[in-house]
Image (cartoon, grey):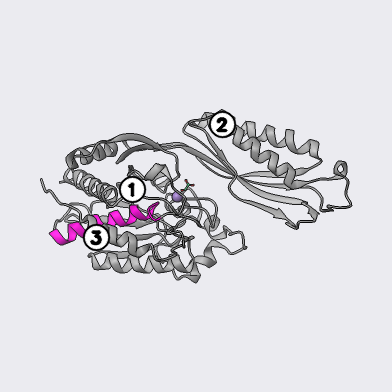
Amino acid sequence: MQNLKINAQRLWDTLMETASFGRTVKGGINRLTLTDDDKEVRDWFRKAAEAAGCTVMIDEVGNMFARRPGRREGLAPLAMGSHLDTQPTGGKFDGVLGVLAALEAVRTLQESGYETNAPIEIVNWTNEEGSRFAPAMLGSGVFAGAFALDYADGRQDRDGNTFADALLRIGYRGAEKAGAQILENAGATIGVVTGVQGMRWYDVTVCGEDAHTGATPMHLRKNALLGAARVIDAVDAIGREFAPEGVATVGLIENRPNSRNVVPGEVFFTIDLRHREDNVLEQMEQRLRLALAAILDPLGLTYQEKQIWGSPAVRFAPELIRCVRRAAEEAGFATRDIVSGAGHDAVYVARIAPTTMIFVPCLKGISHNEAESTSLEECAAGAQVLLNAILEYDRGLA
Ligand code: GLV
Ligand code: MN
């Protein structure tokens, strides 16, 4: 058995180097998908992967696959990876660590001259975050056949730019059809991740009437923002009712006309509901629908509510979960089973190939925040377990 050690400092240096693409003053990253900063980090990743002996292929939704050949090319590749896009006030590790730990694992194989049986791939999925173009996990979703290409292409950001135009603009519309290859394994970021909770996203527009703040008596107002505020409180109450597994959030709101002396006539906002049991998530949705009507009708407001995305709860492949446990043991790390609260590309990949994930701790659990913090040792532990797990699985293919 080989005892290959990843290079912790080199991994850390790549994390810090790539954090310069979209760095924020608070030390986080603002690298929304398909922006100039995303292009720069993609270009960097392509060069780094090529230098590590990989051939890089880009598919039609911009997913990047860096492949290192195996001894037996007929075997399906073992893929590891995550995403390089971030939230607008994202941290330096969410997603990025999954891609760069995979790069570190490949660099370690390359410098030791280790030949795996199966080809190894590092994957950078497009638009995992879903912050600029909803829904999340769009690239992996097209890859896995959960979304049609046309659907992805037509997604619009809040400024009306389409996903297809943004992809072309940065030069990452690849020739390869998405999902043309088969994955055997995908890992991303030492939590042994047994699954991912179910998620549903909604768009809501509340319509009232623009009116003069000075000249419109209180009883004659149709104040869309007041309605939205009460719904936001009700959404939070739904999350609390179903806690700790249930969570419910309004994260984006646009108030129109957003003028201090106009009673707001229209408000757009988003809702994100999550739970690890799909039937409980369904109950949360029913509570939401009741709350919308009960709150908005008496205020004289109309509304449109649309579920724009749903991702059922996922359970990962038991044989790969065992591989990760053994890999962590081999490296001398304690493990904890965990169901992911966040969505990940692994959700869609799991539909077409055995899949699991590896988690490392982050300080106080803070993520989607510029203060997101994971130590060099923790990043290295994740990368080492990733490499061990891949080798453990690959040895079984001999
Ligand atoms: C992405 O990180 C999500 O969980 O929405
Ligand atoms: Mn994220």
Residue denoted by label 3:
10
Residue located at (17% from left, 40% from top): 330
Whole-percent x, y for residue 45 in the image: 33, 65
The mark that comes first in sequence, 3 or 1, is 3
Residue denoted by label 2:
240
Q: Nearest the camera: 239 or 389?
A: 239
Position of residue 82 in the picture relative to residue 280 (left or right): left
Magenta-drawn segment:
92-112
Residue denoted by label 1:
189
Q: Residue furthest left?
A: 1
The mark that comes first in sequence, 1 or 2, is 1
Residue located at (48% from left, 55% from top): 87
Q: Is there any visible trace of residue 130 in the rendered image?
A: yes
For label 3, the crowd category at 10 Å Cα-Cα, with few meaning under 14, some 14 to 19 and many 20 or more, is: some
Compared to 29, does 273 lie above or below?
A: above
Task: Judge whether residue 161 is colored magenta.
Answer: no
Q: Nearest the camera: 170 or 15?
A: 15
Position of residue 209 in the picture relative to residue 345 (left or right): right
- The secondary structure that dominates the magenta segment is helix
Looking at numbered disc 2 in the image, what kind of residue is underneath it?
Arg
